[in-house]
Every structure is written in C-alpha cells, then in structure tokens.
Amino acid sequence: MPSPLFTRLLAVTRPYMDEKKAAEVIERQIAKIGATADTLAATHLGGLRDRISSVLGLYVSDAGKREEMVVKLKAFA
C-alpha cells in the first residue's frame, strides 16, 4: 500500500497529468534513493522535491499548467 506521502504527491499531479504516468515517474525517482511508494517518507523529500518537479514538468505540455504544478510540488511538504 502506498505511503500517505506518495498518495498526496499523486493528488497534486492529478489535475495536470495522467495519474499512472505520474506514479511511474515518481517511483523511478524515489528508487534512486532507495525508497519505494510504500516507504516514501518526509525525510526523503529534501533532495527529491526539485528532481520530481523537473521530471514531472516534462510531461505537461501547457506551460502555464506546468508552472502551476511545479510550484505546488516544490511547496509540497
């Protein structure tokens, strides 16, 4: 079962992109630090926030929506 933090990250991306694609991208990024959807915790966010925001931004074609999503992800805590 995904951690509450992982679920909240997906909720932020939902208005901007396909949830399945967002989950795949986030899972790839968190795997690089040894975390999984089930184990993702606030302590992991420090180095991941910018990376996840940048990579997910590549999948949103509308510049305004992309910027809106990136701002929300970077403010995510």
Image (spheres, rainbow, N blue to C red):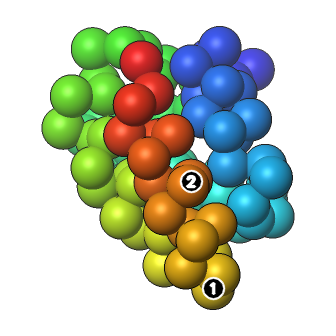
For marks 1 and 2 on the same chain, the one whose residue lies earlier in the sequence? 1
Q: Quadrant of residue 53?
A: bottom left
Count of labels in the image: 2
Residue that sits furthest to the bottom in the current view:
61
At label 1, the amino acid type is Ser
- Dot 1 surroundings within 10 Å: few (below 14), some, or many (20 or more)? few
Q: Which residue is mark 1?
A: 61
At label 2, the amino acid type is Met
Q: Position of residue 1 (x, y in %)?
A: 75, 20
Q: Position of residue 10 (x, y in %)?
A: 69, 40
Q: Visible in this render: residue 24?
A: no
Identify the element where label 1 is drawn. loop
Identify the element where label 2 is drawn. helix
Q: Quadrant of residue 6?
A: top right
Q: Is residue 7 left or right of residue 72?
A: right
Q: Residue at x 49, y 34 (%)?
A: 36
Q: Residue at x 75, y 64 (%)?
A: 17
Q: Position of residue 24 (x, y in %)?
A: 62, 59
1 and 2 marks in contact (CB < 8 Å): no
Q: Quadrant of the C terminus?
A: top left
- Dot 2 surroundings within 10 Å: few (below 14), some, or many (20 or more)? many
Q: Residue at x 66, y 25 (%)?
A: 8
Q: Is residue 10 left or right of residue 53?
A: right
- CA distance for labels 1 and 2: 12 Å
Q: Which residue is mark 2?
A: 69
Residue that sits furthest to the left in the current view:
47
Mark identifier at residue 15: none
